[in-house]
Image (spheres, grey):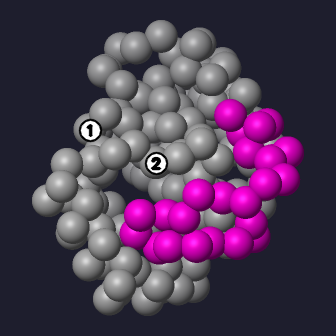
Amino acid sequence: MDERPQRRELEFNDLDAVIRDVEALDAAGYHQVGNWDLAQVCGHLADWMQYPMDGYPRVPLPIRVMLWAMRMTVGRRELRKMLAAGSMASGRPTLQSTVPPSGSDQAAAVDRLRCIAVRFQTHRGDFVPSPLFGDVDRETMMRLQLIHCAHHLSFLVKK
């Protein structure tokens, strides 16, 4: 019999629920069933929540070309697929600059995510077009954030 914790099935309806989950993991401790600890997850989520408001990082030319090609061909289809499924595939690459080092300051990472989530919820301007999906409306961007949060937090299981 396998006694190791299994990945959680999560679905968030709003960012307040995300923050409650993060705070519960922070307070109670957690089992890590994926590659990242809570500080790494929070840092990564905060970065990707901030980018639509402030702009995405400039990536090397070959990656920009690849993202442009994907946006022009499969980006919208992938977006519809992700939204319909309510989940993201595991094992996809991400910008390494959005993954803090293991063992980073967990309290600071939780607080940063909390602040960015509040800012995201109250953001009333347009969003910067996604390098992969292009222009995305507010409702879709929120749904993407909730799916992204559920994906990464599912690998952390409260003790």
Q: Position of residue 122 (x, y in %)?
A: 85, 45
| Badge 1 amino acid | Gln
| Dominant secondary structure (helix, strand or loop) of the stretch shown in magenta | loop
Instruction: Name the residue: 77% across, 37% down.
Output: 119
User: Is residue 62 something one can see in this rendering?
Assistant: yes
Q: Is residue 156 above or below residue 136?
A: above
Q: Position of residue 66 (x, y in %)?
A: 21, 69
Q: Secondary structure at mark 2?
A: loop
| Badge 2 amino acid | Tyr
Q: Position of residue 117 (x, y in %)?
A: 72, 39
Question: Which one is closest to the eye, mark 1 or mark 2?
Answer: 2
The span shown in magenta is 116-139
User: Is residue 157 something one can see in this rendering?
Assistant: no
Q: Is residue 96 magenta?
A: no
Within 10 Å of disc 1 (Cα), the crowding (few <14, some 14-19, many 20+) is few
Query: Number of callouts in the render?
Result: 2
Within 10 Å of disc 2 (Cα), the crowding (few <14, some 14-19, many 20+) is some
**Which residue is tagged 1?**
96
Instruction: Name the residue: 53% across, 47% down.
Output: 55
Q: Answer with the quarter of the image where residue 97 lies.
A: top left
Instruction: Name the residue: 36% across, 25% down.
Output: 100
Q: Is residue 73 above or below residue 98?
A: below
Q: Which mark is residue 86?
A: none
**Which residue is tagged 2?**
56
- Image quarter (top left, top right, bottom left or bottom right) of the C terminus: top right
Q: Position of residue 129 (x, y in %)?
A: 54, 64
- Report the side of 7 relative to 53 (left or right): left
Question: How far, Cα to Cα, is label 1 from label 2?
Answer: 14 Å
Instruction: Name the residue: 52% across, 32% down.
Output: 42
